[in-house]
Amino acid sequence: MSSATPTSSPGADAPLLVTQLHDLHVELGAKMVPFAGYDMPVQYPSGILTEHLHTRESAGLFDVSHMGQIRLSGETFAAVATALETLCPADFQALQPGQQRYSFFTDSSAGILDDLMVTRMGPGDGSDHIFMVVNAGCKDADIAHLRANLSNRCKIEVLADRALVALQGPKAAAVFARLVPESGKLKFMSGKSLNAAGFDVIATRSGYTGEDGFEISVANKDAVAFVKKLLADPDVKPVGLGARDSLRLEAGLCLHGNDITEKTNPVEANLVWAMQKRRREQGGFPGAGIVQQQLADGPSRKRVGILPEGKAPARAHTEITDFGGRVIGEITSGGFGPSLGMPIAMGYVETAHAAIGTEINLMVRGKALPAKIAAMPFVPHRYQR
């Protein structure tokens, strides 16, 4: 559930869209690049390494307004939750008021169409609704998917009038509490509507860096003033897509389109924790039979962490081989881990080679470079549970 290393979008000839914060990024000296159809900041003058380490040590602020914000509502919260469960393998019916869950849309082959965040919002009764955030590159397809399958059961509202920012790092909570003390009551994976120094926001204590922090939805008309308020705090620095990608990789978090796709299923992707027991047992979502079979028999391959030896990073699509030269898998994300000062990667290998410590080779520019299967996350999560 993250921004990738920027690439041209499929509609590369179409004019790039911009977020409400675009002019502010330019004013701050950001290097802008095409990503998912938007003109987005990949880094600011301080550079990706500095931005990454600042987020690990203090508080980084990310513009993630290109992602999709959606509200699902209906006659009762139970009806909305039950409807959404026909598309996702999470237990939404059990969500408590303000509680958030990570989930994904699956297809009939149990492939992952997109991953997403779902929060129960409202006064805490049957009138509560679902607030959903989906990935930028899948946004249009996700909205069409919801409308095609749930229009007769839910009201589907695309919140195009709202920006979204992520405040991440060990000082994020203190920074946000200076604007809205009540935010300190939120725990990891929970959300609430708040008034932050005069701005009405929807805040969830979540993010995609492995650090404590918040994702904050704010009206477009207030976005620039709100972000300037946050940036006025000396602990906060703006951070671009480059560091966002290295941070999530260190945290062992999947990137849709790389680590999870319609060709990967939740069991081999090590995402069984996101499918609660009732859903695993009862099914009722696309591809449920395949998931249940994989749970019973075990997957033929697994998503793993990888530590290359030396200093050469191994990028996505690098082949993984055994010592006999046989291809046993592929890297799906790879790069340099600034917090560790060394290259890191994740990918899929045959289950027989997935044990931590297993020695493998990575085919980098025609050379077999040694590496080992490693535990993830590479950097410990610091969520406030």
Image (cartoon, helix red, strand yellow):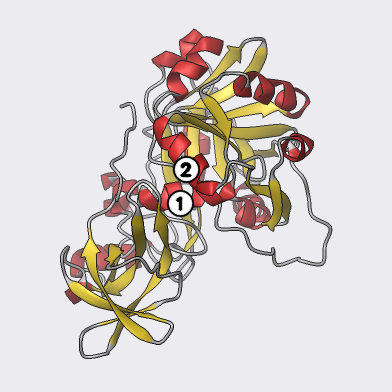
How far apart are the two marked residues, 2 and 1, measured between alpha carbons?
Answer: 7 Å
Q: Is 310 in front, or is 194?
A: 310
> Which residue is under mark 2?
52
Q: Is residue 162 visible?
A: yes
Indicate the position of residue 119 as horizontal and vertical percent values.
49, 32
- Vertical side of 87 occupied by 288: above or below: below
Q: Is 139 in front, or is 47?
A: 47
Tag 2–tag 1 contact (CB < 8 Å): yes
Q: Looking at numbered disc 2 in the image, what kind of residue is underneath it?
A: His
Indicate the position of residue 242 as horizontal and vertical percent values.
55, 51
> Which residue is under mark 1?
246
* 152 left or right of 385 in image: right
- The residue positioned 50% from the left and 41% from the top of the image is 50
Q: Nearer the viewer, mark 2 or mark 1?
A: 2
> Quadrant location of the C terminus?
top left
- The residue positioned 65% from the left and 50% from the top of the image is 143
